[in-house]
């Protein structure tokens, strides 16, 4: 949309730093003094985490014409809404469930909070799947926290001959993309991967650590969406039931893919949602607020900053250790002896697998 974007964070690291740099975003480490952020004036500050908000507007002299706080969770401590909500130009929640929780906890009017739902970027709308296998053969699990029952269901489905891949922490870690999702007949997932699949016309079995409805359909999609497609609001399932539902219910889901894509086009298109938000009254009549510096807020923020600095050092040491390990592996693999012994390793691994 033509904006110059600067990303400020208290903790940053791989793999996301490299991805941001590819987009030519300037990254500011808020644990260090930086003229790019100190005493700076921005047209828009879009904040997701309260410690970042406090560091910018309470501890530093950063200024912004318009300040937006977008809550991505109603129970994660870092994502709780700042206490000085009256000084925010816009307060967003990523789901109806989140909005209702914030209004109850803070005693706010529901109209004060705008629901800004998870949505699919433009790349997911270009080439939807027009051909689908009649029988489910390839299944992806997209999750950084799959519960035991999902992993066990995956093993059952593999025994039935399905090609199953877990994408995420504990499995194969890959950057999500439209081309990646197009490789699969269906996906078990929650959260923002759901509208990605809607846009691409890929069937979704919605389930993760909070449980879930299973195959999304006309009867459960609205309620699931109110809970951010997190699986909350539904019961948990046994691995056996899940595997049975995934295997037997695939064909029925194919009939609703056009309707899901239309639903997502109306509610979960990132570019359109952002354009509508930027035209909101709270954005068109911006003001510069003075944020309260209460003793309690300052004390809590100072405690968090000390913790963040400790974590930063720990992460730096860990990254250095991993980098040294990778360099040593590369060095060993580049030696003549490693290349000469390659055929013996292949034969040894073949024999070992055959013995097992």
Image: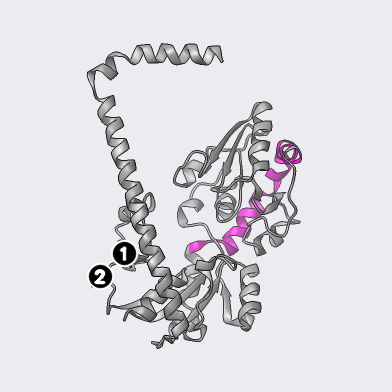
x then y, percent, for residue 186: 62, 41
Left/right placement of residue 169 relative to residue 158 reads left
**Main secondary structure along the magenta-highlighted residues:** helix
Query: For residue 75, what is the image quadrant?
Result: bottom right
The magenta segment is 241-270
Q: Secondary structure at mark 1?
A: strand
The disc, 2 or 1, on the residue closer to the chain's N-terminal end is 1
Q: Residues within 10 Å of mark 2 (few under 14, many from 20)?
A: few
x then y, percent, for residue 27: 31, 62
Q: Quadrant of the C terminus?
A: top right
**Residue at image mark 1:** 29
Residue at 68% in and 43% down: 254
User: Residue 34 got which mark?
Assistant: 2
Q: Secondary structure at mark 2?
A: loop
Residue at 62% in and 57% down: 262
Q: For the residues labelled 2 and 1, say whether their Cβ atoms are less than 8 Å apart.
A: yes
Q: How many marks?
A: 2
């Amino acid at each position: 949309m033509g904006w110059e974007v600067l990303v400020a964070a208290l903790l940053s690291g791989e793999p996301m730093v490299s991805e941001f740099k590819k987009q030519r975003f300037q990254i500011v480490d808020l644990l260090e003094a930086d003229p790019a952020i100190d005493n700076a004036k921005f047209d828009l500050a879009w904040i997701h985490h309260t410690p970042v908000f406090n560091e910018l507007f309470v501890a530093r002299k950063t200024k912004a014409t318009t300040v937006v706080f977008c809550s991505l969770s109603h129970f994660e401590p870092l994502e709780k809404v700042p206490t000085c909500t009256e000084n925010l130009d816009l307060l967003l929640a990523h789901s109806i469930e989140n909005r209702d929780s914030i209004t109850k906890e803070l005693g706010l009017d529901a109209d004060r909070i705008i629901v800004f739902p998870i949505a699919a970027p433009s790349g997911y709308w270009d080439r939807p799947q027009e051909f689908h296998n009649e029988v489910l053969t390839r299944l992806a699990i997209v999750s950084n926290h799959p519960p035991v029952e999902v992993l066990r269901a995956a093993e059952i489905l593999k025994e039935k001959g399905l090609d199953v891949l877990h994408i995420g922490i504990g499995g194969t870690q890959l950057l999500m993309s439209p081309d990646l999702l197009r490789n699969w007949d269906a996906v078990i997932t929650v959260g923002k991967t759901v509208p990605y699949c809607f846009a691409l016309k890929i069937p979704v079995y919605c389930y993760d650590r909070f449980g879930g409805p299973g195959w999304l359909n006309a009867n459960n999609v609205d309620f699931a969406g109110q809970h951010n497609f997190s699986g909350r609001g539904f019961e948990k399932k046994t691995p056996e039931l899940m595997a049975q539902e995934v295997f037997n219910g695939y064909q029925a889901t194919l009939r609703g893919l056009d309707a899901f894509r239309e639903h997502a086009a109306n509610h979960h298109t990132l570019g359109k949602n952002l354009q509508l938000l930027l035209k909101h009254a709270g954005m068109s009549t911006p003001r510069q607020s003075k944020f309260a510096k209460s003793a309690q807020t300052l004390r809590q923020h100072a405690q968090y900053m000390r913790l963040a600095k400790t974590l930063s050092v720990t992460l730096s040491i860990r990254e250095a250790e991993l980098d040294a390990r990778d360099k040593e592996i590369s060095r060993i693999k580049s030696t003549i002896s490693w290349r000469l012994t390659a055929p013996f390793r292949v034969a040894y691994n073949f024999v070992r697998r055959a013995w097992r």
